[in-house]
């Protein structure tokens, strides 16, 4: 029988400590972390849209459901988010306009504190209303939409409805 020789690669290896090559692992994390963050944002938006579109209509309920009187007695509260202001619409009351503030660097920012105060006042006038409809315009950033929804939730509105503003309606 012939003896098998050691492979040429095996005999050329250096013996002793060799440093780990962490570049493939770093590359993996560099690609995985942004992907996971993107998935989180997508899931968050999907959950928001699922939660918000449940009130958009088509739930199959008739006027007889609920036993709370006629549909005209219900007060609908809407928050319209413009690129430069908020408007809070509450039933047949005049719209409450919340303008933007100028920052130190000259840019404009939304006044979330005034929005919270206006929402709390609206909630005090209508304690039975737990649904608010948020209507952002296309030019409104996602961050502004999410912050506005968070302010609505902190003001006591449990369910947030999401609608697109109708052209000419506002």
Image: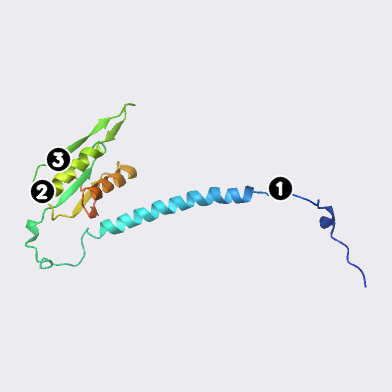
Whole-angstrom CA distance, mark 3 to mark 2, is 14 Å
Whole-angstrom CA distance, mark 3 to mark 1, is 66 Å
Q: Which residue is mark 1?
A: 19
| Numbered disc 1: secondary structure | loop
Disc 3: CA contacts within 10 A as few (<14), some (14-19) or many (>=20): some
Q: Earlier in the sequence, mark 3 or mark 1?
A: 1
Q: Nearer the viewer, residue 75 or 80?
A: 75
Can you name the residue that lies furthest to the right here? 1
Q: Which residue is mark 3?
A: 96
| Numbered disc 2: secondary structure | helix
Can see residue 2? yes
Q: Nearer the viewer, mark 3 or mark 1?
A: 1
Disc 2: CA contacts within 10 A as few (<14), some (14-19) or many (>=20): few
Q: Are marks 3 and 1 in contact (CB under 8 Å)?
A: no
Q: Nearer the viewer, mark 3 or mark 2?
A: 2
Q: Residue at x 92, y 70 (%)?
A: 2
């Amino acid at each position: 029988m012939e003896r098998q020789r050691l492979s040429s690669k095996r005999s050329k290896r250096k013996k002793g400590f060799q440093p780990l090559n962490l570049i493939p692992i770093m590359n993996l994390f560099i690609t995985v972390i942004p992907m996971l963050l993107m998935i989180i944002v997508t899931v968050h938006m999907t959950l928001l849209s699922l939660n918000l579109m449940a009130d958009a209509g088509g739930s199959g309920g008739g006027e007889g459901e609920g036993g709370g009187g006629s549909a005209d007695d219900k007060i609908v509260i809407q928050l319209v988010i413009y690129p430069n202001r908020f408007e809070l619409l509450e039933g047949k009351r005049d719209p409450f306009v919340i303008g933007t503030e100028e920052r130190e660097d000259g840019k404009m920012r939304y006044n979330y504190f005034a929005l919270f105060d206006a929402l709390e006042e609206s909630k005090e006038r209508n304690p039975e209303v737990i649904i608010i409809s948020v209507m952002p315009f296309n030019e409104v950033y996602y961050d502004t939409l999410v912050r506005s929804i968070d302010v609505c939730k902190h003001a006591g509105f449990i369910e947030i409805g999401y609608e697109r503003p109708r052209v000419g309606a506002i």
